[in-house]
Amino acid sequence: MAKRDLDERRSANRPIESGPMQDRNPDHNADRKVGRPRHSDKMPLPDYAEGVQIRTEDDDLRFNNALARGLAILRAFQIDTPLLGNVELAAITGLAKPTVSRLTFTLTQLGYLRHREELGKYELAAGVVSLAYPYIANQAAPTLARPLMQEMAARTRTNIGLGVAEGLSVLYLEYALGELTPNRRQRVGFRVPLVRTAMGRACIAAMGREERNRLYEQLRETYPREWPVLHDQLEHAVEQVQLKGYCIAAGTFQRNTNSVAVPFVHADGRTVMAFNSQASAQVNTPKAMARHGKELLELAETIRRRMTP
């Protein structure tokens, strides 16, 4: 089944460190089974849904398409689109409208969606929290890191985050707001694109070469026109981490916002995370980011020691 792109509701060209981005091809993945970003020529606000991937079918016989379609409905709801009707959900997921209607009815009955009759739309219900809680509750790093993150946030006047790589995104597991006018969207579960942020690039730098090459192939398909520039930026971030332990992203996701991040690989060797310090360019100057990067390295090392049996 042909898939529509995920973001008819989105726009994208973003500033990058090396200069203006190349235009992206809006139709490069019209026939793919995985939802991909579509980008216009406008310079938008940050696109928090950029890294979202929606799969509704696969040729592998072990893949349950019905389950994937139900999860696709849930993944379609994002911070900028909290209310969606069946027509919108069909456009986002590429599913037939009758299929969407049955799925939304079922998810509502199970407590994962709530129907707003006055609007004719659906929103996520409290039941989705129960899916995430066991995962979050069993993560030791956020609990150990929180007091140290709060102290650093207050002292540096920057926002300190801990995120985990998930597909083409990074999801926040913990946060501490230090800016005088912080981004109030930063909460546990907050999603940012892997390729645009220092946190995401630090996660990429922490991957082994084989895993990173597999990711690069996926990114090459997702961002075909700008991949040469993105590849250079990502490799530069890897070099920064190898030389200094941290990497910097200046204005690559939000204009006038700079961030620095350090990788943090869980003791299991599989879960790739990162700590970051993010603030306005006036606060997170190059000199400040170098200082904050070293402090994040110390913070990560402290957490690593405390997690060691």
Image (spheres, rainbow, N blue to C red):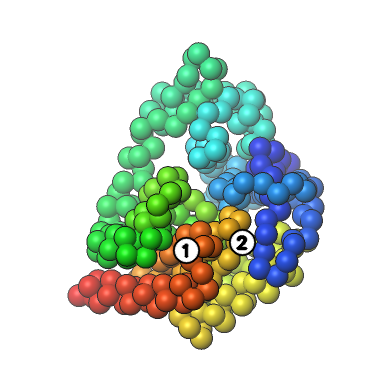
Splitting the image into 4 quarters, where does residue 72 fall? top right
Q: Residue at x 20, y 75 (%)?
A: 309
Residue 157 in sight in this render: yes
Q: Give the labeled residue for mark 2.
A: 252
Can you identify the residue that label 1 sits on? 283
| Secondary element at tag 2 | loop
**26 or 29: nearer the viewer:** 26
Q: Residue furthest bottom?
A: 243
Q: Residue at x 45, y 45 (%)?
A: 185
The quarter in which the N terminus is drawn is top right
Does 289 appear above or below 49? below
**Residue located farthest toward the top when viewing the structure as drawn:** 118
Residue 297 is situated, as x and y percent measured from the top left of the image, at 37, 76
Look at 70% across and 70% down and name the residue there: 18
Residue type highlighted by circle 2: Thr
* Kind of residue at badge 1: Val
Residue at image location 38% in from the left, 60% down from the top: 157
Q: Position of residue 293 (x, y in %)?
A: 43, 74
User: Residue 122, position in %: x, y?
Assistant: 50, 25
